[in-house]
Image (tube, rainbow, N blue to C red):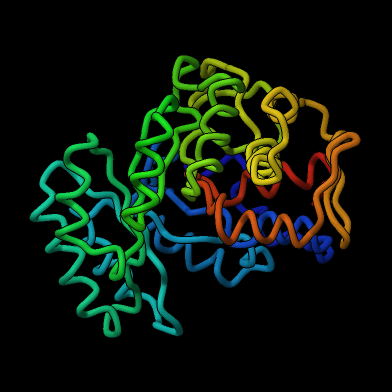
């Protein structure tokens, strides 16, 4: 089951205002292989191809795949026509050497495959990060290090100095996996201070903070989940040095009417951002978020009449 909104991606929608398009352009890295969707490789690849051909393709980011499944991805991709090169973000496992070789070999043949890994994501302790950067230089791929919510400023600055980026978990399939708004706010502020860009993963299926089932199973537990509008607008505010208590208020906002977008900019209650400020934040700071569904976030934007 790819999402609760399966099949709705073809709905006709008017062109989004410039500020909303700047905020959401290529923002959703499609992670259909992962829970709670858990699609097969063939289904996930077919879904991604469908999304690329849809009217919502402007919001589609990279295809997320583990390094040890690149061969499986290649087989599934080979069954589709190659019209242009897909961009992949690749999860590196415990065996840095073998996975780095998989990525290198895959990219060496990227033209014939019709896909290329342009970023990798890995969870490592501070002492192991330099080793990985020696194996896969940032000039070849962009490296994201998954870090803790309370990652110290000096470590975030070291990631930036190495030419890498940070990755934050914003949820999961249990309520305990969802970080507090204050924790996320502190992380965003430290990233802004350190000059390190980040991506988010897990739990950002819905545009505005609200209570939802944590999986697609019947009678699944429910919890209050962060909204991707909340998180990415708060990140844009972080670059403008907005106080953390105001950023926390953005993250905690549960009323879709608090959010407004037009061609000039975005407004959250009385706080504003220009479209250029949003575009700069997305280009240089708040890069994307991984989601096991591409359809559900956009369907929910329509439900709350923002898209």
**Side of 256 where 8 appears, left or right:** left
- In this view, the residue in front, 56 or 201, is 201
Residue at coordinates 61% horizontally, 66% vertically from top-left?
Answer: 57
Image location of residue 211, percent across then percent down: 66, 21
Position of residue 85 measured from the top left corner of the image (x, y, whole percent): 41, 78
Q: Nearer the viewer, residue 224 or 300?
A: 224
User: In percent of the image, x 65 and y 34: which residue is there?
Assistant: 227
In the rendered view, does 96 fall on the left or right side of 230? left
The relative height of residue 296 versus residue 103 in the rendered view (above or below) is above
Q: Residue at x 80, y 63 (%)?
A: 18
Whether residue 30 is situated above or below residue 174 in the rendered picture: below
Q: State which quadrant residue 233 falls in.
A: top right
Q: Residue at x 55, y 27 (%)?
A: 186
Count up the numbered dots.
0
Q: Is residue 109 left or right of residue 267?
A: left
The x and y percentages for residue 189 are 57, 35
Q: Position of residue 23 (x, y in %)?
A: 69, 54
Vertically, is 288 above or below 60?
above
Front in this rendered view, residue 262 or 213: 262
Left or right side of 148 for 122:
left
């Amino acid at each position: 089951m790819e999402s609760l909104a399966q099949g709705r991606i073809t709905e006709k929608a008017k062109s989004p205002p410039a500020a909303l398009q700047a905020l959401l352009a290529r923002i959703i890295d499609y992670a259909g292989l992962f829970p709670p969707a858990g699609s097969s490789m063939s289904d996930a690849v077919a879904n991604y191809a469908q999304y690329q051909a849809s009217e919502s393709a402007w919001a589609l980011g990279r295809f997320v795949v583990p390094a040890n499944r690149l061969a499986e991805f290649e087989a599934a991709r080979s069954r589709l026509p190659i019209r242009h090169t897909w961009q992949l973000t690749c999860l590196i496992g415990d065996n840095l050497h073998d996975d780095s070789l998989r990525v290198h070999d895959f990219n060496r043949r990227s033209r014939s495959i019709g896909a290329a890994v342009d970023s990798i994501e890995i969870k490592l302790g501070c002492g192991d990060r330099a080793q990985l950067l020696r194996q896969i230089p940032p000039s070849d791929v962009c490296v994201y290090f998954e870090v803790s919510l309370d990652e110290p400023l000096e470590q975030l600055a070291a990631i930036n100095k190495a030419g890498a980026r940070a990755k934050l978990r914003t949820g999961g399939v249990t309520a305990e996996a969802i970080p507090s708004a204050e924790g996320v706010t502190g992380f965003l502020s430290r990233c802004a201070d350190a000059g390190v860009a980040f991506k988010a993963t897990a739990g950002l299926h819905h545009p505005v903070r609200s209570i939802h089932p944590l999986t697609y199973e019947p009678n699944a537990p429910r919890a209050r989940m962060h909204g991707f509008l909340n998180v990415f607008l708060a990140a844009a505010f972080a670059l403008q040095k907005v106080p953390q208590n105001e950023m926390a208020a953005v993250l905690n906002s549960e009323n879709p009417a608090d959010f407004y977008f037009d061609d000039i900019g975005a407004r959250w209650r009385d706080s504003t951002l220009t479209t250029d400020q949003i575009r700069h934040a997305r280009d240089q700071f708040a890069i994307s978020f991984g989601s096991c569904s591409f359809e559900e976030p956009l369907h929910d934007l329509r439900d709350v009449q923002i898209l």
